[in-house]
Amino acid sequence: KAANFFRYFSSLSSDLILLCLFAGEFEEESKQPALSEQQKHQLKHRELFLSRQFESLPATHIRGKCNVTLLNETDVLAGYLEKEDCFFYSLVFDPVQKTLLADQGEIRVGSKYQAEIPDKLTEDEVDTRVQEKMETKVWDPSNQLKDAQIDQFLVVARAVGTFARALDCSSSIRQPSLHMSAAAASRDITLFHAMDTLQKNNYDLARAMSTLVPQGGPVLCRDEMEEWSASEAMLFEEALEKYGKDFNDIRQDFVTMNVFPQKRLKAAEADSKLKQVYIPTYTKPNPNQIMMPGSKPGLNGAAGFQKGLSCESCHSKRTHTHTHTSHPDSPR
């Protein structure tokens, strides 16, 4: 069983234009060394295009062994010319649809896509960068607070978030239980808000506490996930397990556009209420029960009194009814 690969000249003319553009972008982004026209011509014969087709061939058709690898942006194209029977591919060709697609996601390398880290300044060197164009500081690790104090403040922030969700009507519908509200209050957005509050108040715990609970009520921090109900979150988790990160298939099979918000809220209210389960009365007698002589047979096919059977413990053939009476004032 062999996989089919296509050569450069076996594609259509419309695809050749795309291949030339792709090769030019690859050489520019990866900063390949200059190649001669002869080397470029030889590389065209080393480039293959993967297909999803497989064929079963007899072993007598095997002429030799070749290596086909996925082209990496850090690879040097001229290195493939130095090895014999060494080929590379970067695109997948569909011979039926006549299309070329990337085999997998690529990591772009270069100054256009990755930050250039400057050299570390010495002690006597002056920083000449414009500070207004730099990022805004949101946390200072060299603050005067201890780690235990910061952890205690984060616990207070979670408690405030839980109390704020108890006061909010929409949150009480989405998170009907205390555990769900506490879990929602422990999300990253609450912790980020607490740490940002410490930074803005210069790591003063008293001022930061007042900021968490202003005059209008406790601060409620939410993210996008809290807009989903518990059933929607479970449905999305099921979709990820089934399709992975193919969101087009998830939207087609799992997302329904005909669900109105009123119906969703009613469904959430119904889930939060206790459900009544009807348990029918059990009238079928126990076949192991010892019945009195002359009694009727049991219901639903159960055996009635059978002569000769006795209790396995006391060897009695009839059940005794014990009646215990006591004075109302006597202890029980």
Image (tube, rainbow, N blue to C red):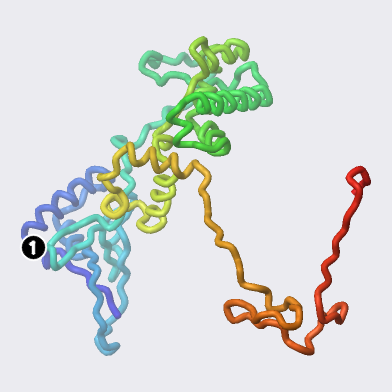
Is the residue 24 above or below the residue 219 in the image?
below
Q: Residue placed at 56% from the left, 34% from the top?
A: 182
What residue is disc 1 on? 12
- Residue 198 in which image quadrant: top right
Which quarter of the figure is the N terminus placed in?
bottom left
232 vs 22, left or right, is: right
Is the residue 324 above or below the residue 234 in the image?
below
- Residue 41 in which image quadrant: bottom left
Q: Give the farthest residue toward the left.
A: 13
**Residue type at mark 1?**
Leu
Q: Residue placed at 61% from the left, 68% from the top?
A: 283
2 vs 197, left or right, is: left
- What secondary structure is found at the residue carrying circle 1? loop
Is the residue 221 above or below the residue 29 in the image?
above
321 vs 274, left or right, is: right
Q: Give the farthest residue toward the right.
A: 330
